[in-house]
Image: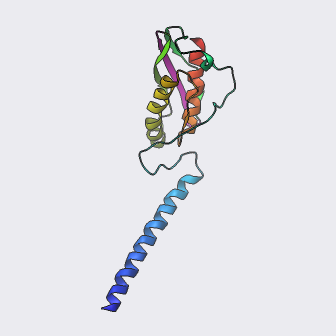
Amino acid sequence: MEPVKNLKRNKGILVAGFIMASSMYVLSQYVGSAQAVVASNAVLVTKSQPAFSVSSPSNKTAGSYADGTYTGSVADAYYGKVQVQATVTRGKLADVQFLQYPSSQSTSRSIDGRAMPILASEAIAAQSSSVDIVSGATFISQAFQQSLHSALAQA
């Protein structure tokens, strides 16, 4: 009976080792790239400053934008271009739509699909382009900030 127990225990250790090694290999495939591995469907948000330095329309108080629809400049998101359209109603940022975003690669579509709604809702909540960077979506986050900034500068 003793050899059977050892065989089962050793088999379990081998399986666990194989799973660990496989996970490490998959993780190592993403470490050097611009894409982040997200272990679940959760998207982390981190604080950051916009990747550009110009005077910010975010200094305006809520309700101080002119009503209308404003199209932001096209910004480079490394894997493609980002352009947003901001809608201002009653002096407040009411909606943000993506007119352009990186979509040629399946990884970009996956990451951007999670990040874009977060970026838009954070901008509306903040009433400015100064929003947090979405972890794993740094390039689109920075391009979003830049394009939204130019749209709100018009308002």
Q: Is residue 69 above or below residue 1?
A: above
Q: Is residue 126 above or below residue 19?
A: above
Please report the residue visible at 56 percent of the width from the left and 22 percent of the height from the top: 128
How far across and down, in percent of the image, does residue 138 sit?
57, 38
Please report the residue visible at 54 percent of the width from the left and 28 percent of the height from the top: 82
Specify whether 96 is left or right of 73. left
How far across and down, in percent of the image, does residue 37 sit?
50, 50
Q: Is residue 87 magenta?
A: yes
Q: 7 and 49: which one is in front?
A: 49
How far across and down, in percent of the image, does residue 155 sit?
56, 11
Please report the residue visible at 33 percent of the width from the left and 86 percent of the height from the top: 5
Q: Is residue 113 magenta?
A: no
Specify whether 54 is left or right of 127. right
Q: Is residue 75 above or below residue 48?
A: above
Q: Main secondary structure of the magenta part?
A: strand
How far across and down, in percent of the image, does residue 79 sit?
56, 37
Image quadrant in which the N terminus is located: bottom left
Residue 74, can we see it? no
Specify whether 1 is left or right of 147. left
Please report the residue visible at 47 percent of the width from the left and 27 percent of the height from the top: 120
Q: Quadrant of residue 53?
A: top right
Q: Residue furthest front?
A: 61
Residue 126, can we see it? yes
Q: Write the start and end of the magenta stretch as one range.
A: 78-90
- Numbered disc total: 0
